[in-house]
Amino acid sequence: MNSQACENRGTCPAAFYICGPTASGKTALALQRARELDGEIVNADAFQLYRGLEIVSAAPSSEERAIVPHHLFGVLAPTDSSDAGSYLRLAKPVIEEIQSRGKTPIVTGGSGLYLKFLTHGPAPLPTGDAKLRSELDAQPLDELVAQLAALDPEEHGRTALQNRRFVSRALEICLLTGEKASTLRDQWESKTAEISASLRGIVIQRTRPDLHARIAKRTRQMLNGGAIGEVAAIGEISANCEKAIGFREIRSFIAGEIDRATCEELINAATRQYAKRQETWFRREQWLVEMRL
RNA sequence: GGCUCGAUAGCUCAGUUGGUAGAGCAGCGGAUUGAAAAUCCGCGUGUCGCUGGUUCGAUCCCGGCUCGAGCCA
């Protein structure tokens, strides 16, 4: 089906995207497609970018990586931070390089925002500023909301004002650029539809009971397969990297705060919730072809 | 065997001086362009153990039964 998608595009080798919720089987499918298409796999998972979290982030094994070329796995140190913009800067040259050799990049991952940047390009917005963010974090939410209302009434009107992250980001854009966040965002919005029309990819779908069973099985394999040692071995870690599902729970288990069964269930619940958010995200990406497994 | 306590949502529990019930967690739906495995919004999903009785009306009061915990034997 993707070879056909490729021909339709007329500019083979295009990139092919494999998306879907965590534990849905993206890694296995990517391997299969890569062999069929003589392709190479490019990571689009925010946490598989990190080194030292291979087990917790369910990164492809070294055996799997040996089958076809894999890119952007374990390229960041645990002390590094990442965001959608830096991912785009990392991934774009890699993808172009693969294409230049006549191979098809099989971009695989479940980080919706990262994929969005890759497929639809960055908005003309500034990178997050750590110093400004910590200043904004120190202020009460209603003050941030009031500031946003004053600087950019339109953005204020369409932002979820209970969401501190969204409010501070909107404010950050205004303060950093001296322009209105609403205007800058509109510039990006207007061009996304035509971009979507040129993209080819699939989103894996599974029934909830199936997905939940797969999550439970994978969590158990992780815990039995070295995840605890992996977390114990990690030294310094950035606040960004620390947010990997499983990391905090396993640390808590190692510290004796929770027992192993609780640790396992907490990881399962967090993973199920994440998977649900991913499904909601990808449901909106209408260019993705649904693939029921 | 006797006595006491408990039995309410998937789980842990609250509650109704008798008018068919609500929290947390789980779950479900959604938002989401630079922290995104993040952050935020919405939704209660129920034979109130079973069975008789009292009552206009019982999840609540009374009797019996079942199961569980504890105490005494």
Image (cartoon, rainbow, N blue to C red):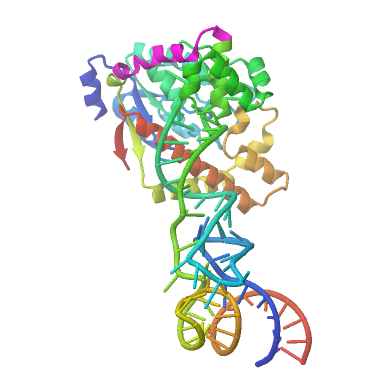
Per the picture, the main secondary structure of the magenta-coloured stretch is helix
Residue in the image at 45% along x and 37% along y: A277
For the question of whether residue A32 can be seen, the reply is: no
Residue A225 counted in the magenta span = no
- Residue shown at the point (58%, 28%) measured from the top left: A164
Q: Tally the numbered discs.
A: 0
User: In this picture, is A252 found above or below A38?
Assistant: below
Residue A182 in magenta stretch: yes
Q: Quadrant of the C terminus of chain A?
A: top left
The residue nearer to you, when weighing A255 against A142, is: A142
- Which picture quadrant has residue B51? bottom left
The residue closer to the viewer here, B60 or A49, is B60
At a point 50% along the width and 33% down the height, the residue shown is: A59
**Residue A174 visible in the shown view:** yes
Q: Is residue A209 above or below residue A72?
A: below
Q: Relative to the observer, which residue lies in front, A60 or A67?
A: A60
The location of residue B73, given as percent across then percent down, is 77, 92
Residues drawn in magenta? A176-195
Q: Residue at x 53, y 11 (%)?
A: A126
User: x, y percentage for residue A286?
Assistant: 31, 29
Q: Quadrant of the N terminus of chain A?
A: top left
The image quarter containing residue A28 is top left
Q: Is residue A37 left or right of residue A182?
A: left
**Coordinates of residue B53 in the picture (x, y in percent):** 49, 88
Residue A163, position as x, y percentages in the image: 55, 30
Relative depth, front residue between A149 and B54? B54
Q: Work out whether A194 lies above or below A263.
A: above
Is residue A133 placed above or below B47 in the rendered structure? above
